[in-house]
Image: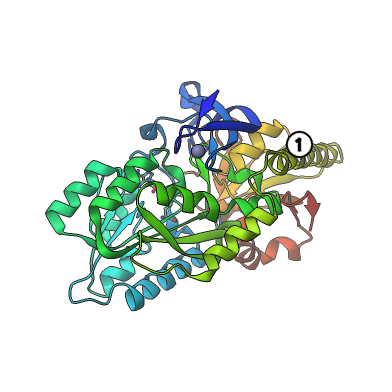
């Protein structure tokens, strides 16, 4: 039996993807033999409702100097984080000497705006490569994992934070107990802990099962986040649904009793209960959808290959590792994937070993079909790659179902 990382309750497994590689482990051909594999299975806690992975990957294997994901790679996300920073500056960072800490600040896309406003800030980012990029832009970063001891040191050296912010990072951290104790040590009495992550409600609704991979240890809901916050002496005081990355929720957490929760919290919790979002049957329904999508995608790719069509992938996303490896898609069905990230180009997709080519070469010549793995950036990519469809190219999407656009 697997015990819940939050409450020690029983975790009931609802889907097992089998042995999977690390989703951001883009290796050169000569290095693939050393790749790390683990069992990717996901379950729901019968006691506290938290949806979580059953096996934890050691954190240094995922987050190290070579971590390839650059937050600034998408124009839409740059705008999203600039707006987020402006909102925090206007609402929470208004005192005489405000202090903003970001957990998982990556290349500094959000904190750069806080810095430009002349506000005291600090990023906590264990992946040294992206942390260096942020420092080049003048953003202050501590290369470290955020946990209780890091937070206590920051509080001692720099004082308490008015805002602790994190995007697409808290769900990556299995040791949430240490994170919450750290927030307790670092947050000013009236401060807020704000974080946004992929929302289980959207994953179930849109069948976006590829959000399940090594780094996404938790799939949060308002119900499960409120529960974990309470265990550590905090209240969930606001929730806001965000349209980025296929559907996220921004959670605002304050010390117990410090702020009146907005009605949006109770509304979303009630909606989750009506949808039976944490029920095993609901989550097993997601599993049935996963098998259907993978079967349909493999069938389509086989048919296209047999017809002699040229097919490629677009976006060497972390998410795509789950689809490609669970469906068993390799270079025979998908000869290459195009991507804009310098650290991924020339490497192989984890597990499937499909070569990655520069997106600049996409049109030399265009393939007949392209599987859109970066579906969370659909608008941006379709607007950039108009030449592909103009010369007759067709996009293939696989969520919420397999379709040729
Ligand atoms: N916040 C950025 C965004 O939303 O684009 C980056 C998100 S990226 C998917 C996750 C980041 O969290 C990585 O840069 C990783 O190194 C960092 N990270 C992982 N564990 C962490 C921890 N314990 N403390 C701080 N950062 C962590
Ligand atoms: P993400 O889904 O984790 O945000 O990763 C998106 C990936 O897609 C990343 O490797 C960069 C790549 N990408 C492109 O190749 N072209 C684009 O226009 C965009 C927005 C992303
Ligand atoms: Zn639990």
Looking at the image, can residue 309 be seen? Answer: yes
Closest to the observer, 104 or 165: 165
Q: Residues within 10 Å of mark 1 (few under 14, many from 20)?
A: few
**Element type where label 1 sits in the image:** helix
Is residue 358 left or right of 93 when viewed as pictured?
right
Closest to the observer, 301 or 99: 99
* Residue 289 occupies quadrant: top right
Asked whether mark 1 lies closer than 8 Å to ligand 2, one says no
Q: Which residue is mark 1?
A: 291
Query: x, y percentage for residue 376?
Result: 60, 57
Is residue 14 left or right of 216 when viewed as pictured?
right
Q: Residue furthest front?
A: 257
In this rendering, the answer to whether 305 lies above or below 203 is: above
Looking at the image, can residue 329 be seen? Answer: no
Query: x, y percentage for residue 109?
Result: 38, 62
In this rendering, the answer to whether 242 lies above or below 304 is: below
User: What residue is rendered at 41% in x and 51% in y?
Assistant: 230
User: What residue is rendered at 36% in x and 33% in y?
Assistant: 60
The N terminus: image quadrant? top right
Query: x, y percentage for residue 205?
Result: 70, 54
């Amino acid at each position: 039996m697997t015990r819940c990382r939050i409450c020690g309750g029983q975790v009931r497994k609802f889907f097992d993807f089998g042995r999977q590689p690390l989703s951001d482990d883009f290796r050169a051909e000569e290095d693939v033999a050393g790749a790390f594999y683990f069992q990717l299975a996901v379950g729901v806690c019968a006691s506290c409702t938290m949806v979580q992975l059953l096996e934890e990957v050691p954190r240094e294997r995922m987050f190290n100097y070579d971590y390839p994901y650059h937050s600034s790679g998408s124009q839409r996300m740059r705008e999203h984080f600039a707006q987020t920073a402006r909102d925090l500056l206007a609402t929470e960072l208004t005192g005489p000497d405000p202090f903003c800490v970001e957990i998982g600040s990556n290349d500094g896309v959000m904190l750069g705006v806080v810095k430009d406003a002349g506000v005291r800030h600090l990023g906590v980012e264990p992946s040294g490569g992206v942390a260096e990029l942020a420092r080049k832009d003048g953003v202050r970063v501590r290369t470290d994992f955020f946990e209780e001891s890091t937070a206590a040191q920051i509080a001692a050296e720099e004082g308490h934070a008015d805002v602790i912010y994190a995007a697409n990072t808290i769900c990556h951290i299995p040791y949430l107990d240490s994170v919450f104790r750290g927030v307790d040590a670092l947050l000013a009495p009236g401060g807020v802990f704000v974080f946004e992550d992929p929302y289980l409600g959207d994953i179930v609704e849109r069948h976006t099962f590829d959000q399940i991979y090594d780094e996404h240890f938790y799939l949060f809901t308002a119900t499960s986040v409120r529960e974990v916050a309470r265990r550590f002496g905090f209240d969930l005081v606001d929730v806001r649904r965000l349209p980025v990355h296929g559907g996220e929720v921004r959670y605002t957490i304050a010390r117990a009793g410090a702020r009146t929760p907005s009605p949006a919290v109770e509304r979303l919790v009630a909606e989750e209960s009506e949808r039976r979002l944490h029920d095993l049957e609901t989550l097993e329904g997601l599993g049935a959808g996963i098998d259907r999508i993978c079967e349909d995608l493999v069938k389509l790719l086989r048919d296209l290959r047999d017809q002699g069509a040229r097919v490629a992938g677009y976006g060497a996303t972390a998410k795509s590792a789950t689809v490609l490896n669970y469906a068993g898609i390799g270079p025979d069905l998908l000869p290459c994937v195009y991507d804009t990230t310098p650290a991924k180009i020339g490497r192989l997709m984890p597990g499937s070993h499909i070569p990655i080519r520069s997106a600049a070469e996409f049109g030399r010549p265009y393939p007949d079909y392209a599987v859109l793995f970066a579906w969370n950036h659909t608008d941006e990519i379709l607007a950039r790659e108009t030449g592909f469809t103009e010369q007759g190219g067709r996009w293939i999407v696989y969520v919420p179902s397999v379709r040729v656009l």
